[in-house]
Image (cartoon, helix red, strand yellow):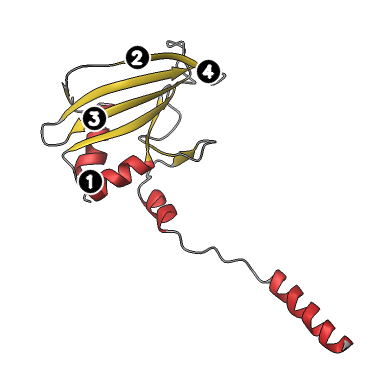
Amino acid sequence: MLHHLRLQIVALLLAASAPVVAEPNAWDDWVRDNSPHGFDVTPDGTIWINLYEPGEPDDFAVRAGDLRDARQKGSPFIRFWVRGFHLKNKEVAYRESKTFLQISCNEQKIRRILRVTYDASGKQFSKEEMEASDSIIVPGTYAAEMHRLFCQVPR
C-alpha cells in the first residue's frame, strides 16, 4: 500500500515538473504577424497595434480587433478606433486620445466621428463630435498609413 502511494506522489511530482508548453493561439499569432512596429495591451485587455515605431511626440495605434475584423470582412467602409499617446508632445494639454474614424477605401477618404482626450491621470479631458463630411486622404500622413493598413494590405 505504501509503495502505491509513493508511486502516485512521484507521478504527481513528475507531472508538476514537466515543462509547460504554450498552446498555439491563432489570435496571438495574428497580432504578432500584423504588428511590424509592435503592440500595446491596455489594462482593460485591449490590444493596440502601433502605426509607427514608438518614441515620437505622438504615438498612434489602431485597435487590433478592428483591423482583424476589417480585413476579414473586406468592406469598402471601415470604422475603427485609434489611440494616441501624447506623452512627449507638450503642445497639447492632454496625454492620451481615442478617436473613432471611418475610411472609405474606394474613395480614399476619411471621416473623424468622435474624439475623446484624457489627462495624465486618465480622467476625461474633452469629448467632441468631429467632422460631418469626409476628407481626402493626403499621402504621407497618418490617415494614409491607416488607409494602407485597412484597405490595401492583402486580406
x, y (%) of residue 70? 26, 43
In the foreground, 133 or 61: 133
Q: Earlier in the sequence, mark 4 or mark 3?
A: 3
Q: Secondary structure at mark 3?
A: strand
Q: Mark 3 — residue?
A: 102
Which mark is in front, 1 or 3?
3
Give the amino acid type for the residue marked by disc 2 in the picture: Glu
Separation of disc 1 and disc 4 at Cα? 35 Å
Q: Earlier in the sequence, mark 2 or mark 3?
A: 3
Give the amino acid type for the residue marked by disc 1 in the picture: Val
Give the amino acid type for the residue marked by disc 4 in the picture: Lys
Separation of disc 2 and disc 4 at Cα? 15 Å
Q: Mark 1 — residue?
A: 153
Residue found 25% across the figure and 50% down from its top? 72
Q: Earlier in the sequence, mark 2 or mark 1?
A: 2
x, y (%) of residue 137? 18, 26
- The answer to whether 26 is drawn above or below residue 2 in the figure is above
- The answer to whether 13 is drawn above or below residue 80 in the figure is below
Residue found 34% across the figure and 14% down from its top? 128
- Give the crowd class for mark 3: few <14, some 14-19, many >=20 residues within 10 Å: some
Q: Mark 2 — residue?
A: 128
Q: Which mark is residue 11?
A: none
Separation of disc 4 and disc 3 at Cα? 25 Å
Q: Secondary structure at mark 2?
A: strand
